[in-house]
Image: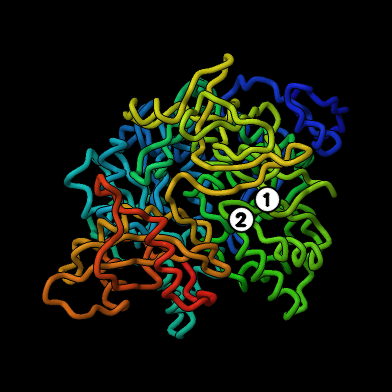
Amino acid sequence: MTYDGAVAPTTPDPRRPWTASYADGVPLDIDPVTEPVTRNLDRAAQAHPSRIATDFFGAVTTYDTLHRRVLRAAGALRALGVSPGDRVALVLPNSATHVVAFYAVLRLGAVVVEHNPTYSASELEHQLRDSGATVVLAWEKAVDAVLTARPRTDVRHVVAVDLSADLPVAKRLALRLPVTAARRTRESMRSPVPRDVPRWHRLVARAQPLPDDAPHPSVDDIALLQYTGGTTGVPKGAVLLHRQVAANAAQGHAWTGHAEATQTVYAALPFFHAFGLTLCLTYAVRIAATVVIFPRFDVDSVLEAQRRRPATFLPGVPPMFERLAEAARTQGVDLTSLRHSISGAMSLPTRTARTWEEVTGGLLVEGYGMTETSPVALGNPLSPARRPGTLGLPFPSTWMRVTDPEDPTREVAPGERGELQVAGPQVFAGYWQRPEETADVLLEADGRTWLRTGDVVVVEDAGFVRLVDRIKEVIITGGFNVYPSQVEEALRSMPEIDDVAVVGVPGGDLGERVVAAVVLAEGVSRVELSAVRAWSEQRLARYAHPRDLVVVSDLPRSQIGKVLRRVVREQVMTRLPQRHDEDRPA
């Protein structure tokens, strides 16, 4: 059944014993998805036309207006030659325009390819070339990087997006004032772009809207290419169909039980990340929520918005909850409107959950997923039965099994450690143009498609899953994924460095911090961390820069020459002072 907000009786499924721990009213299964993601916006606009859909620093858009803007933006994209199946790259921070562009691309039947707007030209080049994107909508500050990458891609059109155009009129006018505060704000949002680069808002203003009765995409059409390192660290596009993205939004709806047109969701997670995209773009629209949008997480901005338009639901990562709780207590800001909050992307410390619940009086629960699961696969129940420190229980319509990491077809005995595998309607269709890597992670058994997560877990009593270790080597810092191989490749090109291994170590409220163990080039006696970071700033996103540096004489390797990262990590841990890292990612 599809959960519609009414309490439904839950009879546990003996084949899925964890369902006995579901919160009251959560169904065991959702109905098969029969409509694309775009239909959710249509329904919200029809049922709740005057409901505020987005709030960007006080500039509000209703669902009816959002729907009409999406059709006009789809017309602008069609005028650029975008057709069903074409890939359109979005290189944008969170903004009202991002919401419109996202749904406009999908409404045409084209494919959204999300990118971090702080990526370097080389990072963008790889993804743009791999996806075959033909049109890029880029924030003004990202235009130079896109143009640098463009010659080696299939990109035909680069369109600049002025983020300040989404602001309320008064705030846009204030940016022109000759005062320091206005100049700083203007510089943080805008940047000059070449005269021959078209402007998004001008294109949309001149466009003929897509007819309301234009065909929607099929549920089996590709909706998204989300780039991820998967279990290898090599960036590749996870293919997510409309069916899978819509299913995960429906599963989230079943899990929370939120009634339509009642929630105010704070979008402080980046839309380009699968977690923020689902919770703040697809799930939020499914329930006709008001989405309060932040270009980046900033404590003061969030608390200011809380005074103006109180939140009821906040998806985030542990450092966000820690900083908000501390600031709210210090400034006397009331957070009791927040009844439900969901933490993901990194482990949620018990103390963080306890503090948040003391400050808000609501629940903070941990969820688990991957880009390959659209992204949520497990979650703690929104009930007193939640267990901080665990990944939770499989979502409705989701199955799990725990297998021998060396033999993924053999299940381990109950209570033993093994690799988590999940199956369900949210599991992705595979990696874009990488059949061999797809075959490595998707297995057919028992009439289901199982995804190998690369995470070692143990299933405790009542079906709660606890993470034990990662088979994959990804570093999670501040909720962002950092792939050691990418950082190593960037640092190996530095003349002073002969070899390097990158690992993650405990990093306070970051979760992990990136550390580089380097072997110096011949004739080099020392290298400063500041120099290494200056080098990486030209090649990597800010959150991927090394935050510590350890010089070693050589790197430990296996008999076949592979660097033993676990040994490197142990060596690094003995040489670094234990501290909380104050250098947080943007």
Picture quarter with the N terminus = top right
Report which residue position mark 2 lands on: 347
Residue 275: percent from left, percent from top: 56, 47
Residue type, label 2: Ser
Using the rendered image of the protein, determine whether residue 355 is visible from the camera's viewpoint.
yes
Q: Residues within 10 Å of mark 2 (few under 14, many from 20)?
A: many
**Label 1: element kind:** strand
Q: Nearer the viewer, mark 1 or mark 2?
A: 2
Residue type, label 1: Glu
Q: Nearer the viewer, residue 313 or 16?
A: 16
Q: Residues within 10 Å of mark 1 (few under 14, many from 20)?
A: many
Report which residue position mark 1 lands on: 366
* Disc 1 to disc 2, C-alpha distance: 8 Å
| Residue 480 higher or lower than 169, as above or below | above
**Label 2: element kind:** loop
Residue 115: percent from left, percent from top: 39, 49
Residue 15: percent from left, percent from top: 74, 21
Using the rendered image of the protein, determine whether residue 287 is visible from the camera's viewpoint.
no
The residue that appears at 32% across and 49% down in the rendered structure is 159
Q: Nearer the viewer, residue 518 or 325?
A: 518
| Residue 131 higher or lower than 581, as above or below | above
